[in-house]
C-alpha cells in the first residue's frame, strides 16, 4: 500500500450522512507509516457526487 494509490474499503453501515458500504479511497498516509506493523492507514473517501461541492465548509 503506497501513498497516492486508490483502494476499495469496506466501510460499516452509514449512520445519518456518513459514507458507508464499499467505497474507493485514496491513500494519503506517508509511505514510511504504510510499511510499519501498525494496522491502520489514513485515507480520503472518493466520490463522484459533486452536488454539494459549492456548499460552505467544503
Image (tube, helix red, strand yellow):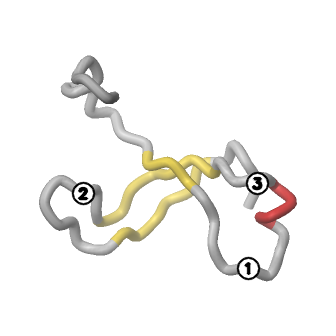
State the mark number for residue 38.
1
The numbered mark, 3 or 2, whose residue comes first in the sequence reads: 3
Q: Residue lying furthest top in this view?
A: 54
Looking at the rendering, which quadrant does residue 49 occupy?
top left
Q: Residue at x 63, y 73 (%)?
A: 40
Mark 3 lies on residue = 2
Say what secondary structure mark 2 lies in.
Answer: loop
Give how far across and how far down residue 30 sits, in percent: 78, 52
Q: Are marks 3 and 1 in contact (CB under 8 Å)?
A: no
Give how far across and how far down residue 7 sits, in percent: 56, 56
Position of residue 50 in the picture relative to residue 47 (left or right)? left
Q: CA distance from mark 3 to mark 2?
A: 25 Å
Closest to the observer: 22 or 27?
A: 27
Say what secondary structure mark 1 lies in.
Answer: loop
Say if 26 sits above or below 37 in the image: above
Q: CA distance from mark 1 to mark 2?
A: 25 Å
Q: Residue at x 43, y 43 (%)?
A: 46
Say what secondary structure mark 3 lies in.
Answer: loop
State the mark number for residue 57.
none
Q: Residue at x 57, y 47 (%)?
A: 26
Looking at the rendering, which quadrant does residue 47 occupy?
top left
Say if 8 sits above or below 44 in the image: below
- Label 3 CA crowd tier, 10 Å (few <14, some 14–19, many 20+): some
Mark 2 lies on residue = 18
Position of residue 56 in the picture relative to residue 36 (left or right)? left
Position of residue 25 in the picture relative to residue 29 (left or right)? left
Closest to the observer: 35 or 57?
A: 57
Amino acid at each position: 500500500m503506497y501513498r497516492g494509490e486508490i483502494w476499495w474499503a469496506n466501510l460499516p453501515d452509514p449512520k445519518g450522512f456518513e459514507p458507508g458500504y464499499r467505497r474507493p479511497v485514496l491513500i494519503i498516509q506517508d509511505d514510511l507509516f504504510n510499511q510499519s506493523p501498525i494496522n491502520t492507514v489514513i485515507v480520503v473517501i472518493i466520490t463522484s457526487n459533486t452536488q454539494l461541492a459549492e456548499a460552505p465548509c467544503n
